[in-house]
Protein backbone atom coordinates (compact mmCIF):
# COMPACT_ATOMS: atom_id res chain seq x y z
CA UNK A 1 0.00 0.00 0.00
CA UNK A 2 1.50 3.31 -1.06
CA UNK A 3 -0.92 5.58 0.72
CA UNK A 4 -3.75 5.77 3.19
CA UNK A 5 -6.75 7.96 2.77
CA UNK A 6 -9.38 9.55 4.96
CA UNK A 7 -12.60 10.66 3.34
CA UNK A 8 -13.88 14.19 4.06
CA UNK A 9 -17.54 15.04 3.51
CA UNK A 10 -17.59 18.71 2.51
CA UNK A 11 -20.79 19.38 4.42
CA UNK A 12 -18.89 19.10 7.70
CA UNK A 13 -15.94 21.16 6.46
CA UNK A 14 -13.88 19.72 9.33
CA UNK A 15 -10.71 19.60 7.27
CA UNK A 16 -11.09 22.56 4.92
CA UNK A 17 -10.88 26.23 5.86
CA UNK A 18 -14.60 26.75 5.18
CA UNK A 19 -15.78 28.07 1.85
CA UNK A 20 -13.55 29.41 -0.92
CA UNK A 21 -13.21 33.17 -1.18
CA UNK A 22 -15.01 34.95 -3.99
CA UNK A 23 -13.06 33.88 -7.04
CA UNK A 24 -12.34 36.32 -9.85
CA UNK A 25 -12.39 34.97 -13.37
CA UNK A 26 -9.07 33.51 -14.25
CA UNK A 27 -7.23 34.44 -17.41
CA UNK A 28 -5.89 30.89 -17.53
CA UNK A 29 -8.53 28.29 -18.43
CA UNK A 30 -7.56 24.86 -17.17
CA UNK A 31 -9.20 21.89 -18.88
CA UNK A 32 -11.64 19.76 -16.89
CA UNK A 33 -9.20 16.92 -16.41
CA UNK A 34 -7.55 15.39 -13.37
CA UNK A 35 -4.60 17.26 -11.87
CA UNK A 36 -1.99 15.56 -9.68
CA UNK A 37 0.25 17.76 -7.52
CA UNK A 38 3.84 16.67 -6.91
CA UNK A 39 3.26 16.14 -3.17
CA UNK A 40 5.66 14.03 -1.13
CA UNK A 41 3.07 12.98 1.48
CA UNK A 42 2.02 9.32 1.78
CA UNK A 43 -1.32 10.08 3.42
CA UNK A 44 -4.30 11.77 1.85
CA UNK A 45 -7.46 13.66 2.73
CA UNK A 46 -10.01 13.09 -0.03
CA UNK A 47 -12.58 15.87 -0.01
CA UNK A 48 -15.91 15.50 -1.81
CA UNK A 49 -16.74 18.90 -3.30
CA UNK A 50 -19.17 18.40 -6.24
CA UNK A 51 -19.51 22.09 -7.10
CA UNK A 52 -16.05 23.35 -6.12
CA UNK A 53 -16.82 25.59 -3.14
CA UNK A 54 -14.39 24.67 -0.36
CA UNK A 55 -11.61 26.97 0.79
CA UNK A 56 -8.05 25.85 1.51
CA UNK A 57 -4.89 27.54 2.76
CA UNK A 58 -2.51 24.78 1.69
CA UNK A 59 -2.34 21.53 -0.26
CA UNK A 60 -1.52 19.63 2.95
CA UNK A 61 -3.32 19.29 6.26
CA UNK A 62 -1.89 18.32 9.60
CA UNK A 63 -4.18 17.68 12.54
CA UNK A 64 -2.84 17.10 16.02
CA UNK A 65 -1.67 13.53 16.51
CA UNK A 66 -1.86 12.70 12.79
CA UNK A 67 0.73 12.78 10.02
CA UNK A 68 0.58 15.39 7.26
CA UNK A 69 -1.94 14.53 4.55
CA UNK A 70 -2.08 15.73 0.95
CA UNK A 71 -5.47 17.20 -0.09
CA UNK A 72 -7.29 15.65 -3.04
CA UNK A 73 -10.45 17.46 -4.14
CA UNK A 74 -13.16 15.35 -5.82
CA UNK A 75 -15.14 17.44 -8.28
CA UNK A 76 -17.90 17.13 -10.84
CA UNK A 77 -18.08 18.82 -14.22
CA UNK A 78 -20.14 21.59 -12.58
CA UNK A 79 -16.95 23.09 -11.15
CA UNK A 80 -16.14 26.56 -12.45
CA UNK A 81 -12.91 27.39 -14.30
CA UNK A 82 -12.17 30.00 -11.61
CA UNK A 83 -12.22 27.28 -8.91
CA UNK A 84 -9.84 25.09 -10.92
CA UNK A 85 -7.45 28.06 -11.18
CA UNK A 86 -7.79 28.55 -7.40
CA UNK A 87 -6.85 24.89 -6.73
CA UNK A 88 -3.92 25.10 -9.16
CA UNK A 89 -2.67 28.26 -7.45
CA UNK A 90 -2.52 26.28 -4.17
CA UNK A 91 -1.15 23.19 -5.99
CA UNK A 92 -4.04 21.03 -4.72
CA UNK A 93 -4.66 17.76 -6.57
CA UNK A 94 -8.16 17.25 -7.97
CA UNK A 95 -10.02 14.58 -9.86
CA UNK A 96 -13.32 14.58 -11.71
CA UNK A 97 -15.76 11.81 -10.82
CA UNK A 98 -19.04 12.60 -12.57
CA UNK A 99 -21.06 15.22 -14.43
CA UNK A 100 -23.40 16.42 -11.64
CA UNK A 101 -23.16 13.64 -9.03
CA UNK A 102 -20.17 11.77 -7.67
CA UNK A 103 -19.60 8.32 -9.18
CA UNK A 104 -17.96 6.53 -6.24
CA UNK A 105 -16.82 3.53 -8.32
CA UNK A 106 -15.02 5.80 -10.78
CA UNK A 107 -13.57 7.75 -7.89
CA UNK A 108 -12.10 4.61 -6.27
CA UNK A 109 -10.57 3.53 -9.59
CA UNK A 110 -8.93 6.93 -10.02
CA UNK A 111 -7.63 7.03 -6.44
CA UNK A 112 -5.99 3.65 -6.95
CA UNK A 113 -4.57 4.43 -10.39
CA UNK A 114 -3.39 8.00 -9.79
CA UNK A 115 -2.40 7.89 -6.10
CA UNK A 116 -1.90 4.14 -5.45
CA UNK A 117 -4.48 4.28 -2.63
CA UNK A 118 -5.32 0.68 -1.75
CA UNK A 119 -7.36 1.19 1.41
CA UNK A 120 -9.89 3.88 2.22
CA UNK A 121 -11.60 4.75 5.47
CA UNK A 122 -14.81 6.66 4.88
CA UNK A 123 -15.08 9.01 7.83
CA UNK A 124 -16.71 12.05 6.41
CA UNK A 125 -20.40 11.99 7.06
CA UNK A 126 -23.84 10.69 6.27
CA UNK A 127 -24.01 11.84 2.64
CA UNK A 128 -20.73 10.27 1.60
CA UNK A 129 -21.55 7.11 3.58
CA UNK A 130 -24.88 6.80 1.75
CA UNK A 131 -23.29 7.32 -1.67
CA UNK A 132 -20.75 4.54 -1.14
CA UNK A 133 -23.38 2.25 0.38
CA UNK A 134 -25.70 2.70 -2.60
CA UNK A 135 -22.90 1.71 -4.98
CA UNK A 136 -22.21 -1.41 -2.88
CA UNK A 137 -18.71 -0.18 -1.98
CA UNK A 138 -18.79 -0.56 1.81
CA UNK A 139 -17.56 -3.87 3.16
CA UNK A 140 -17.85 -3.10 6.88
CA UNK A 141 -19.70 -0.65 9.11
CA UNK A 142 -17.99 0.19 12.41
CA UNK A 143 -20.02 2.00 15.10
CA UNK A 144 -18.94 3.12 18.55
CA UNK A 145 -21.74 3.76 21.01
CA UNK A 146 -21.02 5.92 24.05
CA UNK A 147 -23.68 6.30 26.75
CA UNK A 148 -23.98 10.09 26.50
CA UNK A 149 -27.02 12.25 25.72
CA UNK A 150 -27.04 15.96 24.89
CA UNK A 151 -30.68 16.59 23.90
CA UNK A 152 -29.62 18.05 20.55
CA UNK A 153 -32.45 17.90 17.99
CA UNK A 154 -30.12 18.49 15.02
CA UNK A 155 -27.89 15.45 15.50
CA UNK A 156 -26.50 13.98 12.32
CA UNK A 157 -27.39 10.54 11.03
CA UNK A 158 -25.05 7.83 9.80
CA UNK A 159 -26.58 7.73 6.32
CA UNK A 160 -28.32 10.55 4.46
CA UNK A 161 -29.23 11.08 0.81
CA UNK A 162 -28.68 14.45 -0.88
CA UNK A 163 -29.15 15.82 -4.37
CA UNK A 164 -25.56 14.74 -5.08
CA UNK A 165 -26.26 11.16 -3.91
CA UNK A 166 -27.45 8.37 -6.12
CA UNK A 167 -29.98 5.70 -5.18
CA UNK A 168 -32.49 5.14 -2.45
CA UNK A 169 -32.42 1.36 -2.00
CA UNK A 170 -32.64 0.20 1.65
CA UNK A 171 -29.62 -1.78 2.87
CA UNK A 172 -29.49 -4.23 5.78
CA UNK A 173 -26.49 -5.24 7.86
CA UNK A 174 -25.45 -8.38 9.71
CA UNK A 175 -23.73 -8.14 13.09
CA UNK A 176 -20.12 -9.35 12.87
CA UNK A 177 -18.68 -8.49 16.29
CA UNK A 178 -19.45 -6.66 19.56
CA UNK A 179 -16.73 -5.41 21.91
CA UNK A 180 -17.04 -3.57 25.19
CA UNK A 181 -14.99 -0.35 25.29
CA UNK A 182 -13.90 1.07 28.63
CA UNK A 183 -16.70 0.58 31.16
CA UNK A 184 -19.87 1.46 29.29
CA UNK A 185 -19.10 1.86 25.58
CA UNK A 186 -19.73 -0.59 22.75
CA UNK A 187 -17.97 -1.13 19.45
CA UNK A 188 -20.29 -2.75 16.91
CA UNK A 189 -19.00 -4.12 13.63
CA UNK A 190 -21.38 -5.04 10.82
CA UNK A 191 -21.09 -6.43 7.31
CA UNK A 192 -23.50 -5.57 4.52
CA UNK A 193 -26.01 -8.35 3.80
Image (spheres, helix red, strand yellow):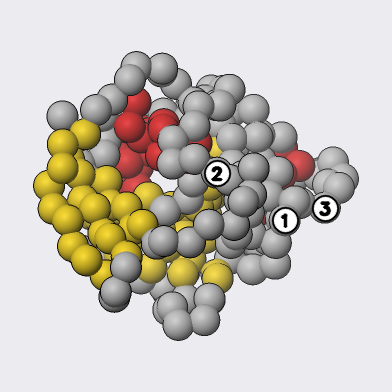
> Which residue position is annotated with label 2?
156
Q: Alpha-carbon distance for marks 2 and 1? A: 19 Å
Tag shown at residue 18? 1
Q: Alpha-carbon distance for marks 1 and 3? A: 9 Å
Q: Give the mark toward the camera: 2 or 1.
A: 2
Tag shown at residue 21? 3
Q: Secondary structure at mark 1?
A: loop
The part of the image, by quadrant, that contains residue 138 is top left
Q: Disc 1 vs disc 3: Cβ atoms closer than 8 Å?
A: no
Q: Residue at x 68, y 50 (%)?
A: 54
Q: Would you place residue 84 above or below residue 77 in this image?
A: below
Tag shown at residue 107? none
User: Is residue 55 rendered to the left or right of residue 97?
Assistant: right
Residue located farthest toward the bottom when viewing the structure as drawn: 65
Q: Residue at x 86, y 47 (%)?
A: 22
Which of the image's four quarters has the C terminus? Answer: top left
Amino acid sequence: MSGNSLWDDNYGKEFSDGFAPELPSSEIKYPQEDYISQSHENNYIVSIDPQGILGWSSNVIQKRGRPKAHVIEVLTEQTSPAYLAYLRQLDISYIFAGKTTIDCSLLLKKLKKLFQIERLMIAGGAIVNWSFLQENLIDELSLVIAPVADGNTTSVSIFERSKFSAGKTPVSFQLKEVKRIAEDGLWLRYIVR
